[in-house]
Amino acid sequence: MASVVSSVIPRGQVDLVDFVDWSGVECLNQTTSHPLANALKQGYRDDDGLRLESDADEQLLIFLPFTQVIKLHSAVITGPEEEGPKTVKLFANKEHMGFSNVNDYPPSDSLNLSPDNLKGIPVTLKYVKFQNVRSLTIFIEDNQADGDVTKVQKIALFGTTVDTTNMKDLKKIEEH
């Protein structure tokens, strides 16, 4: 599996999971028994027994803040053939979105995932729309079979970091 994962990472891009600010991550409409961490965290997302699963209906709304500014190049979203995501909308730097207002904003990119994508084929994004990303909102609108439950095995984001100063790392210098 590791060789497959390394072959999908586009040249010059890195897996951005290390730059996710876990304290601010949110997922609306997830089941408590199958939370977002199962699909997003390294180690968990490569375990076929673990997954993210929707609760009340097929939709999921995921908010991912980053610890530093990133450029997002591509995404791998995997899932089962029938319950895997189909229509996925990505919003760069849009905070405080809910199901009631997600359709009020145009997405930075909209993906229509094929069965091949659900098996791990990366989707290249509109790179110009994802140049200075501080946070990413992922709206999974429906699934392949239009069922009531959406299942996501893995979400992997690939890109690069933008060289900036992490303000949290700065320390105040005291004058004497």
Image: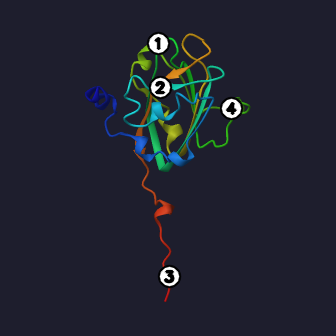
Q: Are marks 4 and 2 in contact (CB under 8 Å)?
A: no
User: Which of pointers 1 and 4 lies earlier in the amino acid sequence?
Assistant: 1
Residue behind mark 1: 81
Q: CA distance from mark 1 to mark 4?
A: 26 Å
Give the mark nearest the N terminus, 1 or 2. 2
Residue at numbered disc 3: 174
Mark 4 vs mark 3, foreground winner is 3
Disc 1 + disc 3, Cβ < 8 Å: no
Q: In the orientation shown, which residue stands out farthest toward the left?
A: 3
Element type where label 3 sits in the image: loop
Question: Is tag 1's residue or tag 3's residue first in the polypeptide sequence?
Answer: 1
What is the spatial separation of the Cα atoms under label 2 and label 3, in whole angstroms? 49 Å
Of residues 112 and 155, which is closer to you in this image?
Answer: 155
Question: What residue is drawn where x is 41% and y is 23%?
Answer: 49
Of circles 2 and 3, the one toward us is 2
Give the spatial CA distance, label 1 vs label 3.
59 Å
Compare marks 4 and 3 and give the one earlier in the sequence: 4
Which numbered tag is attached to residue 51?
2
Most extreme residue toward the front is 33
Q: Can you give x and y, in whole percent of width and height, for residue 81 in the image?
A: 46, 12
Amino acid beneath label 4: Val
| Residue 24: image location, x then y, percent | 56, 46
- Under circle 1, the secondary element is loop
Where's residue 10, x and y in %? 34, 33
Identity of the residue drawn at 65% across and 32% down? 106
Residue identifier under label 4:
102
Q: Is residue 75 left or right of residue 88?
A: left
